[in-house]
Amino acid sequence: MTKQTSRRWLLRGLGAGAVTTLAGCMGNLTNDASGDANGPKGDQQAAEKPGAAESSLLASPALGSANAPVTIEAYTDYMCGHCSTFHLQTLPKVEDKYLSTGDVYYVHRDFPIPLSEWSWNAAMAGRSVQANEGMDAFFAFTEGAYEEQADMSWSAIERVARRVGADAKRVVADAKDGAYRSTVDADRQSGIDRGVRGTPTFFVNGKELVPEKSWWYTVDTGLQAALKE
């Protein structure tokens, strides 16, 4: 069983995802503690305790061969509907067409805008899964979190963590304690430094893609162009 297949096996079939234009999700990038006041209410604690149990930054979650000639980086927010569309509909196509051939390396970047407290909470929960269960479990958790996006809560995070074989109580505790806040912060800051203002935002070999028509069209066109260079 390949890593890609085993990761998909961990979860139920993919949801339909969100219908999207190419506007992406935008927010107040200075509001990194409490999120959107009109958004769903989570646990403020997670956004206020930076790196409580983190001794060093985690490696960036990645799929494919690090030796691939083309690298795509995706800055995403777990509460962005457009990011849900990308993760549930577009990323599987990227895996099938580009990662399976060794042509492309995919790198995940956390970018909580935030749209709500859950932008931070889910991101830190995902990094707890990564730290304790590995990359396959992280990407399986990420798929599951997007499937649960409309009903995001600590109970939903527990359900997804349990489904991918992680210690659900530990994942929630790590997220509430801000155990991997520094890792998420570093990703977010790298995006801000590169001019990221919303999600999803993609860089192919360091060059930002201009979104057009659809997320798949944007990514597919960008990857094809990079492979011809």
Image (spheres, grey):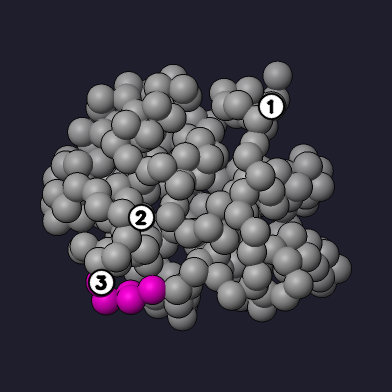
Residue 172 position, x and y percent, is: 26, 34
**Residue 63 seen in render:** yes
Label 2 or label 1, whichever lies nearer to me, is 2
Q: Is residue 58 above or below residue 30?
A: above
Q: Quadrant of residue 21?
A: bottom right
- Where, quadrant-wise, is the N terminus in this rendering? top right
Which numbered marker is on residue 119?
A: 2
Q: Secondary structure at mark 2?
A: helix
- Where, quadrant-wise, is the C terminus in this rendering? bottom right
**In magenta stretch: residue 31:** yes
Magenta stretch in the rendered image: 27-32
Residue 145 position, x and y percent, is: 46, 40
Work out whether residue 19 or residue 124 is closer to the camera in this orientation and state it.
19
View extreme (right): residue: 228
Residue at numbered disc 3: 31
Name the residue rendered at 75%, 47% in the picture. 93
Residue 185 position, x and y percent, is: 30, 60
Name the residue rendered at 57%, 27% in the picture. 11
Residue at numbered disc 1: 5
Q: Quadrant of residue 117?
A: bottom left
Tag 2: amino acid: Ser
Tag 1: amino acid: Thr
Residue 189 position, x and y percent, is: 35, 69
Work out whether residue 151 or residue 195 is closer to the camera in this orientation and state it.
151
Name the residue rendered at 55%, 46% in the picture. 62
Mark 3 to mark 2: distance in Å? 12 Å
Work out whether residue 228 or residue 217 is closer to the camera in this orientation and state it.
217
Q: Earlier in the sequence, mark 2 or mark 1?
A: 1
